[in-house]
Image: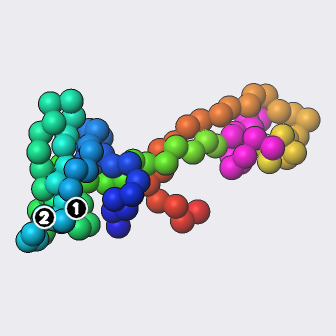
Amino acid sequence: MLDINKPVQTRDGRKARIIATDKKGNYPIIALIDEDETIISCTKKGNRFIKCENKMDLINVPKKRYLYINVYKNDLCVHKSQLEAQKNKDNDLVAKMKIEINETRQDW
């Protein structure tokens, strides 16, 4: 579900800015896309078209998250925090990695 109070972008990653949310009809959201400020209208859910997904649909900007990976000779362990990775490392640690992920789902 689109949260109009948070930053938005198009489904294909273009910058978007909502300028109105009260237009009459099935497409009440008006947004400007990219630097050229192409105007689009969307449903309350951010869809460009009612019956299908489109690259110009509006979505909330994915939240950046980090994972911390302890790498061992024959294994690896993934942790949600740097502190957790540090606490759970073994003596045969070969390397430590921090990776950034863009996350659209918040259910884990």
Q: Would you place residue 43 above or below residue 10 in this image?
A: below
Dot 2 corresponds to which residue?
23
Residue 78 on the magenta segment: yes
Q: From which residue to which does the magenta span run?
A: 68-83
Q: How far apart are marks 2 and 1 (CA)?
A: 6 Å
What secondary structure is marked by label 2?
Answer: loop
What is the secondary structure assignment of the residue under circle 1? loop
Instruction: Decide: is 64 above or below 51.
Output: above
Q: Examine the rendering and report whether any part of residue 47 can be seen.
A: no
Residue 56 position in % (x across, y down):
18, 49
Q: Residue 21 carries which label?
A: 1
Q: Answer left or right for 87 relative to 53.
A: right
Please give left or right for residue 33 compared with residue 97 in the image: left
Q: Position of residue 13 (x, y in %)?
A: 30, 41
Image quarter of residue 30: bottom left
In the rendered image, the vertical position of residue 2 relative to residue 40, given as above or below? below
The image quarter containing residue 54 is: bottom left
Residue 90 inside the magenta-drawn segment = no
Amino acid type for the residue under numbered disc 2: Lys
Give the residue drawn at x 72%, y 46%.
Answer: 81
Q: Where is residue 29 in the image (x, y as percent from the top left)?
A: 19, 60
Amino acid type, label 1? Thr
Task: Name the residue nearer the viewer: 19 or 91.
Answer: 19
Label 2 with label 1: CB-CB less than 8 Å: yes
Report if residue 101 is visible in the image. Answer: yes
The residue drawn where x is 85% and y is 46% is 88
